[in-house]
Image (cartoon, grey):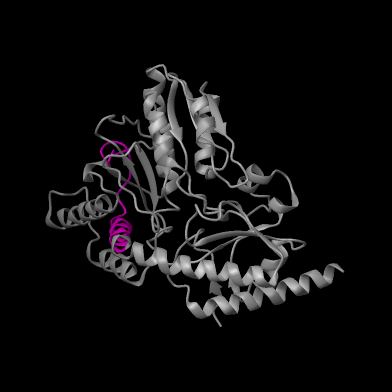
Amino acid sequence: MVPIYLDHNASTPIDPDVLETVSRVSRDNYANPSSIEHRLGAASAKIVERARAQIADLVHSKETEIIFTAGATEANNLAILGVYPNIKTAGRCHVVTSKIEHPSVLACFDHLETQGMSVTRLNVDESGKVSLDELADALSEETGLVSIMAASNETGVLQPILEAGYLAEEVGALFHTDFSQASALVPLDLKNSPIHMASFSGHKAYGPKGVGALYRSIRRPRVHLAPVIYGGGQEKGLRSGTLNTPGIAGLGHAFELIAKNIDHDRERIGSLRTELEKELQAKLQLKINGDPKLRLPNTTSLTIDGVVPQALMQKLKNDVCFSASSACATEHVETSHVLLAMFGDTQRSRSAFRIGLGRQTKQEDIGRVVDLFTSAVSELLLLRT
């Protein structure tokens, strides 16, 4: 029997219709989209631009504000490192982020610090949210960039990115958000928002791996970026490298499907998550980590007293797929930096694990998962006695 997949925060399965698009474009549109002088190259370029329009339509931006990348990690690097030369020249040598960001964001700020930038890393409380008061106190006319994720990939907690963006705008700073975890479940309207840059990923939104996008505003304020990859300058001089036409087509199609399904997905998946938590709480001594309301409808971070997540994962490895920590750091078993920021080095943070539901999660999965977890936890607790 195929395991029940509850690791959608790490990666979503590619939608079957999107997979068909990727396969078709791979087979039929193999020409380089930069070779627009001939018919086949122009056809590939047209596919790329259609995908750009599909993404722009979902997030309410201009098509020219979308830059294709190899994923959200590259998009985060392009946004944060790409804006650095401009804000440094402007004399804005202070930047702000939070302690719970994705490693691709945290590493960029660590690098900026080595280049002489002053970095403020905001704390979070036990709900997993940043404090807008702390952000406001940190901001000054020397601040050039603020980067706060839209939703935690570990707890699903939603951050107040619009309010944070407005605070950044008040001091003339740019605001970036890693929106990759929220793309499939949270509506986004960039047209009149204080968000100046936003990162997206294909494989977090039922699209293919190895492709993503960065939104950068070309309106007021216009975001000036320097490339972090050099070469042919294919993407508006900001991202060099032959465009991944099949992946880009798949990303565009995935975002088009999000536009059609987002309300239904939020309601259905959220209902299943609520049912799962309720049934688990009725049978197990567990804690839900993070704000119980302001979080993604598919995500739950749990701690079960006396249970080591890795042992639970090992016992259920043939039945249920879930994560004990961020999938980007699974080569080493370390306590999640997100949970450490929330609870410190405590048993609660060390014993946390994440369940992420998705489109393919079925009603009948809930009862089976509850039974499997209850049985496994009972066995593990019995071994401790």
| Camera-side residue of 300 and 119 | 300
> How many numbered marks have been drawn onto this rendered protein structure?
0
Position in image of residue 39 (x %, y %): 12, 56
Question: Residue 380 magenta-drawn?
Answer: no
Instruction: Name the residue: 59% across, 79% down.
Output: 368
Q: Estimate the x, y position of residue 79 in percent, counting from the top left.
A: 39, 36
Question: Quarter of the image holding residue 50?
Answer: bottom left
Tell me the magenta residue range.
Answer: 231-257
Where residue 264 appears, x then y in whole percent? 36, 67
- Using the image, determine if residue 133 lies above or below residue 326: above
Compared across the picture, whether 289 is left or right of 261 comes to: right
Q: Residue 89 lies in what quarter of the image? A: top left
In the rendered view of the protein, which quadrant contains the C terminus?
A: bottom right
Q: Is residue 312 left or right of residue 166?
A: right
State the residue lying farthest toward the top: 91
Instruction: Inspect the magenta stretch and tell me whether residue 251 lies in it.
Output: yes
Asked which quadrant contains residue 191, the reply is: top left
